[in-house]
Image (tube, rainbow, N blue to C red):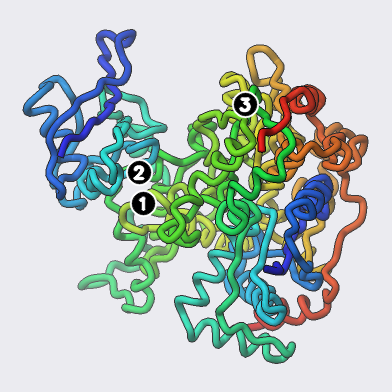
Amino acid sequence: MEQTLRVKRFDPENPGASGYQEYTIEVEETSTILDALIKIREEIDGTLSLRCSCRASICGSCAMRVNGQAKLVCKTRVNAVAPNGETITIDPPGNMPVITDLVVDFKPFWDKMRAVEPYLRPEGPVPETEYIASAESMDHLVGVVNCIMCGACVSDCTVLEVDSNFLGPAALAKAYRFVQDPRDSHKQDRLSVLNNYSGVWDCTRCMQCVEVCPKDVNPMGRIMKLRDLAMEAGFNNTSGSRHTESFAKSVKKNGRLDETKLAVDSMGRFNVPALLDSAPVGLRAMRKGKFPWKAHKSSEPEMVKRVFEKVEGE
Amino acid sequence: MKYAFYPGCVARGGTPELLVSANAVMDRLGIEREEIVSASCTGAGVLQERNEKLGDALNVRTFALAEKMGSPIMTICSTCQGVMSQANRRVLRDPEYLAEINTILAEEGLEYKGTTVIKHLLWVLVEEIGIEALQKTFTKELSGLKFAPFYGCYIVRPSDALGFDEHPERQTSLETVIESTGAVAVDNSGKTKCCGLPILLINQSNAIQMVANHTGEAKDLDADAMVTPCPLCHLNLDGYQPKAAKRRPSGKIDLPILHLPQMLGLAMGMQPKELGLQRHIISTKEVIGKAAAAPAAVG
């Protein structure tokens, strides 16, 4: 069958000429998008640059955007994306500088990965044989160890789009793997770093990373778990942890969310600069009759509270 | 069909105009409903990050209440839709987990059998009422207006919890409904991205940059307004737009953020006050004027 691909081109020596180029080729019903791109390169246009290696979704080289969403193209069939032969748009992965065509510079990815010290840091006497860890203590890490560092999650992270300092989903998922490793002795230091600005609290929970990860690593889920671990470890003096606590308190009390209290508690009741900074927003809302003066309640807040306490008490 | 109505906390809090306009539009459409008055907050993903089972237990309680009423749940909040869909998927996939939660609910005289369907008004319009019937309630054809869709994360991701395999039309439902009014649905790349609200109280600078990017892009694409089925997105995109505007070279954005029912109400020829359009931070005057000047709907 015939298929058209609209491919983003970028020539570093002639940046002004970058744009989309359309190629129409014959593909098989079983062809992947990678098969199609390789065919274009081999049969139509030898100047098209892309990264690939194993062609079996193991090496993590061929992540790129397909119709705006990051995918491993070796794992994505043409007919799954374009069942009726629609044109498919291919872009390089996002949030990383483009070197040429579909090839990006992974330096920001590796810098973040290095920043979380992705290796075991055990203390104490070195055992004569290997460090022993029980199966139960490691089993739950299998999912996160499956990461092939393809960068799909980083490509589509909505926070990295506005803040290149954010550690990002791949590095944070990796950090989780070492925070939870029973052989590591630096859980507290690790959590302390991750609790900082650009760390776990900056994630928006938009689920892009969960959606695009080709290996079901669930980076956002790991970030949420890291937040929980940080609070358990005593790192409670952040807007993020105050936000979570205030939210829970409000639902426990009223069965519903008290937005005004949530805002004040998250900023910190005595954080005068932040409160003053937000005052114009509150005043504008008051003027427009959309300031929630009174907390609204479930008609049975006591029942909600009992369920709340039972689960929390488990 | 009668729905178990779940307006969500924000429609009763920071966006009262959503509830007013949704009720007006649902009355016009003849949607029968009864609010689940004792329902709790869904947890909005925040409770879940602290204790997933806690969030699930509260949501399963709501599902059990709706099941007792014999009605599917209808919400008007993308976030509530997504959080409830995820919770429902988790308990339906794991009968033992559901049994554990039911043990807790049994003490409150409740049990969830697993039959509750949860649908946002947006999906109800497309799947139950149908575009043709919807169009019959329009008195205006909003041709000449351009609306930028903005879904809200939870109604688009994770896709496997939202029934997209069975209902692929959900993925473009907002554009479908916008176009049904005769307006143009602008193709803004931010439409399925995060509005920034979840980190507004944590990293305001990033949250505001998201507002600047999304509303700025829509404005550059000549949109008259943005339309969202998510009140949380509205809170940030409308309330913080004045701050976000300072990050644009022109220092201006001025893009009204309409709730989905408000756009429908304009097509139904309703008065701006009936739709709470005076309760916006970014003035809706211009878009109201354009809608009022729009031609009568044909048929």
Which element type, helix, strand or loop, lies under badge 2? helix
For the point 15% across and 39% down, which residue is it?
Answer: A1
Residue, disc 2: A152
For the point 67% across and 12% down, which residue is it?
Answer: B250
Same-chain check, marks 2 and 1: yes
The answer for how far apart the CA atoms under marks 2 and 1 are is 6 Å
Q: Amino acid at mark 1?
A: Cys
Letter of the chain that mark 1 sits on in the rendering: A
Q: Position of residue A248 (x, y in %)?
A: 72, 65
Local crowd at mark 2 within 10 Å, few (<14), some, or many (≥20)? many
The reply to whether callout 3 and callout 2 are in contact (CB within 8 Å) is no
The reply to whether callout 2 and callout 1 are in contact (CB within 8 Å) is yes
Q: Amino acid at mark 2?
A: Ala
For the point 27% across and 14% down, which residue is it?
Answer: A12
For the point 46% across and 43% down, which residue is it?
Answer: A168
Residue, disc 1: A213
Residue, disc 3: B146
